Image: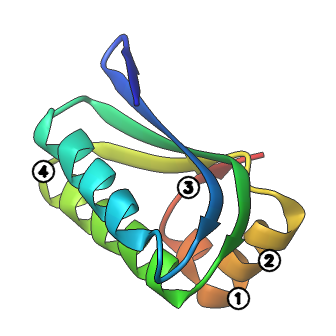
Amino acid sequence: MTEENGTTTLTLDGEIDILTVERVRVALGEAVEARPRRIVVDMSGVSFIDSTGLGALISGFQRARDSGIGFSLSHPSTQVRQVLVLSGLLEVVPVTP
């Protein structure tokens, strides 16, 4: 996790599934508690995400929104982006290419 100019960037990598999701939840919680202006979740290193990972992202987004913190995803792979689209998450969470 890095912080610069009021933006906290959380870099995720590998697979986000039932075995790793708790680390993602904790990291997102810590990012929200730090109260930056914006949280960016860098997904460029994520090779797979399942429903538990989607749930963690949704929860992080909701917590950030409720705290008045901007939240976005960045650089998902084509495979991960497809899962995000199918889940409907990209209808509420902004994503950068």
**Residue at point 20%, 61% (across, down):** 63
Lower sequence index among marks 4 and 1: 4
Q: Which residue is mark 1?
A: 86
Query: Tag 3: residue type?
Result: Pro
Lower sequence index among marks 3 and 4: 4
2 and 1 marks in contact (CB < 8 Å): yes
Q: Label 4: state its secondary structure.
A: loop
Q: Which residue is mark 2?
A: 82
Q: Residue 81 sits in which quadrant?
A: bottom right
Residue at mark 3 to residue at mark 4: CA–CA distance: 17 Å
Q: Label 2: state its secondary structure.
A: helix
Q: Residue 60 sits in which quadrant?
A: bottom left
Q: Nearer the viewer, mark 1 or mark 3?
A: 1
Quadrant location, the N terminus: top left
Residue at mark 4 to residue at mark 1: CA–CA distance: 27 Å
Tag 4: Cα neighbours inside 10 Å, few (<14), some, or many (≥20)? some
For residue 19, above or below residue 6: below
Return the x and y of residue 48 as percentages of the image width and height.
71, 72
Residue 67 numbered tag: 4
Q: Residue 49 sits in which quadrant?
A: bottom right
Q: Nearer the viewer, mark 4 or mark 2?
A: 2
Q: Which residue is mark 3?
A: 94
Lower sequence index among marks 1 and 3: 1
Return the x and y of residue 86 as percentages of the image width and height.
70, 88
